[in-house]
Amino acid sequence: MTIELPALPWPKDSLAPHISVETLDYHHGKHHQAYVTNLNKLIAGTPQENASLEEIVKNSSGGIFNNAAQVWNHTFYWNSMKPGGGGEPTGAIADAINASFGSYAAVLEQFVAAATTQFGSGWAWLVKSGDKLEIVKTGNAETPLTTDKKPLLTIDVWEHAYYVDYRNARPKYIDTFLDSLINWDFANANLAG
């Protein structure tokens, strides 16, 4: 089974002015594509050649893991955003946030702290752990997919995610993600699934 670059879940220009077409040309068209290309080369002729992407992520290490996890993480990240997103959640995810953190403000504070303090490249995640929600951060290609935690949403804090549009202002990118892009519908679907 050949791993393919998934299409973006929305038109490439629909996140502007928050995320530019130029950023997506590089981030999706070059970075994400490179992980897909590298992964296919690494698994060619191996038993993993016929495995699903999630199986490869969960059962690999080294270069295969790094590329597979980055393919999976990036696909999850694209779905964690939507045109006209942002703002406070509704539905089951809002109830779970209030039960786990006490308020939307409290989850925002933890999410911003995790995304801001992730040293170097990585991710901040909203995850389900048992019957509670948590905020976790992972470095490089690491992903909650390899743990007992269920990913609900993520933000990519690798510099290529924001440098064209925000230069070195990671906090401004994080605030914009939360205010204008975050896809609570995706979180609700993951929580229910």
Image (cartoon, rainbow, N blue to C red):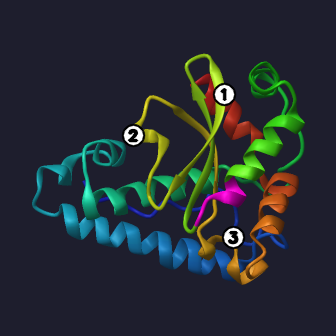
**Is mark 1 in CB contact (under 8 Å) with mark 2?**
no
Along the polypeptide, which appears first: circle 3 or circle 2? Answer: 3
Residue of label 3: 12
**Given this view, does label 3 or label 2 mark the residue nearer the observer?**
2
Distance between the alpha carbons at the discs numbered 3 and 2 = 30 Å
Q: Which residue shows up at 19% across the image and 54% down it?
A: 49
The kind of residue tagged 3 is: Lys
Q: Calculate the distance from the C-alpha at mark 1 to the C-alpha at mark 2.
A: 17 Å
Q: Is residue 63 left or right of residue 33?
A: left
Return the disc, 1 or 2, that comes first in the chain's sequence.
Answer: 1
Q: Is residue 142 magenta?
A: no
Q: Amino acid at mark 2?
A: Thr
* Picture residue at 69% right of the left edge, 79% below the top: 163
Tell me which segment is drawn in magenta: 115-119
Q: Is residue 163 left or right of residue 108?
A: left
- Picture quarter containing residue 97? top right
Circle 1 sits on which residue?
133
The tag on residue 122 is none
Q: Neighbour class for label 3 at 10 Å: few (<14), some, many (≥20)? A: some
- Dot 2 falls on a residue whose secondary structure is helix
Residue 15 makes an appearance in the image = no
Position of residue 186 measured from the top left corner of the image (x, y, whole percent): 68, 39
